Amino acid sequence: MSHPQDLSLREQASAVRRGDLDAGELLTMTLARIEERDGPINSTPVLFEASSRTMLADAPRGPLHGVPITMKDMFALPWRAARNGTPSELIPAAASGPFRRLRDAGAVVVGVANQHELGMGTTGSISAYGPTGNPWNPDHCAGGSSGGSAAGVSARLVAGSLGSDSGGSARLPAAYCGVVGLKLTYGSLPYDRYFGAGTSFSAPGVVARDGADARLLAETLLDRPLARHSGAELRVGVVRDPFWSDVDLEVASAADSALRDAGWTVVELQIEHLELVGAAVLCRLIAETGIPPSSVLATLSRPTRGLLLASLLAPARLVPRADRVRAAVRRSLAEAFTSVDLLAWPCAPTPAPALADPWVSLPSGRTLADTANLRQASIANLCGVPGVSLPVGLHSSGLPLGLQLLAPWGAEASLLDAGEHLELVTERAYVELTPPIARIG
C-alpha cells in the first residue's frame, strides 16, 4: 500500500474501514507530515492534536470515519472560536453546521486551514497567520480566501479540506494549486456558526485531489447522495468575451484543450447583462460588509482596514439597483441552462502571481489579481449556483491551471460527473500531477 498520506480521501476511508489502516496511526502520520512539510507554504498554521484525538475516539462509523481533514478559519469548532484569518475570536467556539455534518460522518478535524484576512482577497497574501505559499512554488500565491485548504491538499498534507466560496474563494485557490475546488449551492446546508451566514454570496466549498473525493466530501456536507452518471454526453456553453478572450494565452489554450479532450458538445452563447455583474457584486458585497469593533479593526492589515472603511462611503441607493441586476442575471443564467448542461471558462485568468507582487498581466493590461479573479468567478456567487475548478495542466512557469464549470442550482452532481469524465479521458494526467513539496522522501 502507498504511504497513507499519499492515498486519496476515499482510499484512506476504505483502508480504515477494512482494518488495513489504523485510524490512530493515520492521525499521527498526518500531524507529523504537517509539522515536517508545511513550513514553506503555511497552509495549516494551527493543529489540534489533543482535540483531534478526542474527536477520533468519539467518531461514528460513517463514510469518513477516521479520515483527517482541515477546516477554514470561517467555521467555529467546539473547542475553538472562528477568527476568519484575524487575531480575534469573532464567532465563539461551538459546533458549526458544516462541522456537525463532517463530525457525524466520522471525519477528524486536525487543524485550521489558513485563509486571506476576513476572506477579503483572492490571493492568500494577507492573514494573521502569515501568507499562504503555493506548493508548486512557495514564493507564489496559493489563492484566497481558502488558500490553506487548496495548498494543504495539493501538498498531500491532508486528502480533503473544507473551505468556503464568496467570490471564487474555493475555486480560485484550487486552480492556483492544481486540485479540485467545488463551491456548493448557496444555502444548501446549515450555516450556523459560519461567517457566510451573514451574506447572500457565501457557500461552503470542498477541496480535494479529484472528482470522486470531492463527491464524497460534498455528499457528507449536503447530507444527500450525488448520483454518478456518465459525463460524456454533456452540452457545455462557453462565453468567449471576456472569460476566454482576456486571459493568459496558455490558460485559454489549456482550457480549450480540456474541452476537446472531454469531447463535449460546445455551444457558443451570451449571457445578458454580463457587463453589469462586476458592479452588482461589488455593491452587494459592500452592503453586506460589517465593520468590526475598533479593538478588532486596529489589529487588521492596512489594506483590509482600507476596504472596510471605504465600504462606509458607498451610497445605499446602489443596493436596490444591484439587486435588480442580480435578478436579471439570474434569469439570463437560467435561460442559458435551458440549452446547455454546464457553462465553462478558465477559472483563474492567469497562473498564481508572486506573493510579493499580487498583480497579473492580461491582454487588456496589468491589474490586481483580485479584480481579474472576481470577474471570472463571482457570477456563480451572485446567482448562488454551484461551480467547480478542475486541474487542466501546468503553465510554462510550472504553476497549475484550472478549468471552471458552472451548473444549475443544486446540480453539483453534474459538475462532478464532468470532472470524473475529464479525468477518465485524460488518464488522470492532470489530477496526478504532484508539486515538489509532496515528493519529499
Image (cartoon, rainbow, N blue to C red):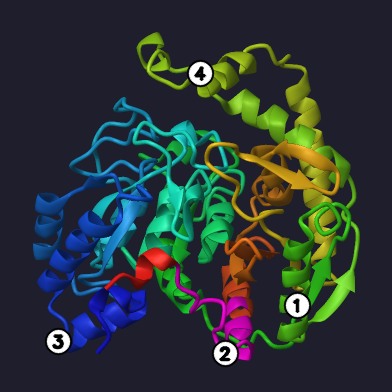
Which label's residue is closer to the chain start, 1 or 3? 3
Q: Say which element carries label 3.
A: loop
Q: Nearer the viewer, residue 279 or 369?
A: 369
Which label's residue is closer to the chain start, 3 or 2? 3
The residue under label 4 is 302
The residue under label 2 is 427
Which residue is pictured at 9% across the width and 56% down the height?
Answer: 54
Which residue is pictured at 47% across the width and 33% down the height?
Answer: 126
Image location (x, y in percent) of residue 201: 60, 42
Q: CA distance from mark 1 to mark 2?
A: 14 Å
Which label's residue is closer to the chain start, 2 or 4? 4
Q: Residues within 10 Å of mark 2 (few under 14, many from 20)?
A: few
Which label's residue is closer to the chain start, 1 or 2? 1
Q: Give the position of the C terminus as an image quadrant.
A: bottom left
The residue under label 1 is 257
**Magenta residue check for 422:** yes
Image location (x, y in percent) of residue 421: 62, 85
Which label's residue is closer to the chain start, 4 or 1? 1
- Which segment did they paint magenta? 419-435
Q: Which mark is residue 19?
A: 3
Q: Mark yes or no: residue 225 visible.
A: yes
Q: Amino acid at mark 4?
A: Arg
Q: Amino acid at mark 1?
A: Ser
Q: Which mark is residue 386?
A: none
- Viewer-nearest of labels 3 and 2? 2
Q: Nearer the viewer, residue 412 or 169?
A: 169
Q: Determine whether label 3 and label 2 are within 8 Å by CB.
A: no
